[in-house]
Image: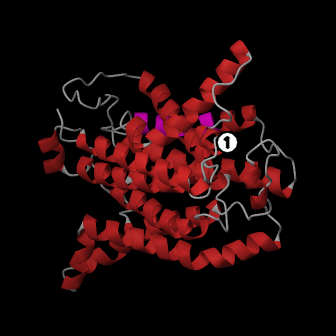
Amino acid sequence: MLYNWLYPFHTDYSFLNVFRYLSFRIIYAAVTAFLIAFVLAPWVIKKLQDIKLGQQIRGDGPKSHLAKSGTPTMGGILILFAVVLSTLLWSDIGKPYVWLVLAAMLGFGAIGFADDYLKFIKTQSKGLSVGQKFTAQVAMALAIALVLYFLPGYTTKLSIPFFKNFVPDLGWLYVAFAVVVIVGSSNAVNLTDGLDGLAIGPVMIASLAYTIVAYVAGHRLMSDYLLIPHIEGAGELAVFTASILGASLGFLWFNTYPASVFMGDVGSLPLGAALGTVAVISKHELLLLMVGGVFVIEAVSVIFQVISFKARGKRIFLMAPIHHHFEMKGWEEPKVVVRLWIIAILLALLSLSTLKLR
């Protein structure tokens, strides 16, 4: 918005030329989102405490988690506000991709809000049913995928890491593929959000990685040099992902162990969907499997646990998702979190290396 309002006056005021530089707007989007989240967090936490929006702890989980009972939840509202406001301020709002990622975040945020609202305000312990939540997610993701499919110039070709000369065209099947990426990413982040700071750390790391990916994909010379698809206007997605990075960093200050607030589904579902949508738009969908490797590990551990129990009547892990397995084996919560962060950083670095490798 600032770009659209102020840059037209750069001929009269030369210092406004700075808004032309995407790198400048990326940095200040992150800083702005951080400040919004950091400054407003104490007030938001107090309001959540006043209306008694406290986390309910499962009785069959690690005993150390019982102390978390009553910790304010639904703090993801703060992340959403910071990301949306910062993105609107610093991005070129004339680009359709900006509105698409914001719609994805707000749409999945509404689903998460409805789920949390039923659980914590209406005290319906399970919130939305699995079917209701999944249907709403698929419907939202399908709308996003269809808009992309019919956007002029958008390609349905699939980018394969390490195989840049192999670009299969999925045609209309790409719509279904995009839905799987977005919904899968949303639920994977949601499953990871079980320990203080666990989900928000890899979200920041993935956001930083996709800030680089989006910047390169939107830059004609860089994308041509690296032999990756050039997506006109995708550079503005870097402003959005930088806003996620900044807002998440501000939230982490209060979500780190021992957490003063949890993000809830209203935070985890839209953050995952946002990453999935950026991956789809930037044509680096499969790269998300590496960038978000921790989320994949967490989701797969749940899938395997369920399949094993239904097929054999036995569990593979002491408890799923896998971060609880390590807790049950005696690892302290901060140790589990930091070690998974380390894995997330390594996977993100490996992922970025694929931009150069052919």
Query: Quarter-wise, where is residue 266 in the image?
Result: bottom right
Q: Please name the residue shown 61% across and 54% down the image.
A: 333
Report the side of 207 relative to 248 (left or right).
left
Pinpoint residue 144: horizontal percent, then vertical percent: 50, 40
Asked whether, in this view, residue 81 is left or right of residue 292, the answer is right
Q: Is residue 215 above or below residue 83?
A: above
Q: Is residue 334 magenta?
A: no
Residue 32 visible to the viewer: yes
Query: Does 208 sit left or right of 298 as displayed?
Result: left
Q: Residue 187: x, y in percent?
A: 59, 39
Residue 35 in percent (x, y) is at: 49, 77
Q: Position of residue 158 (x, y in %)?
A: 32, 28
Above or below for 216 versus 27: above
Q: Which residue is mark 1?
A: 328
Residue range (magenta): 137-150
Q: Mark 1: which secondary structure?
A: helix
Residue with the most extreme top position: 311
Residue 25 appears left or right of 72: left
Residue shown at the point (70%, 38%) measured from the top left: 133
Mark 1: which amino acid? Answer: Met
Residue at image location 51% in from the left, 70% down from the top = 250
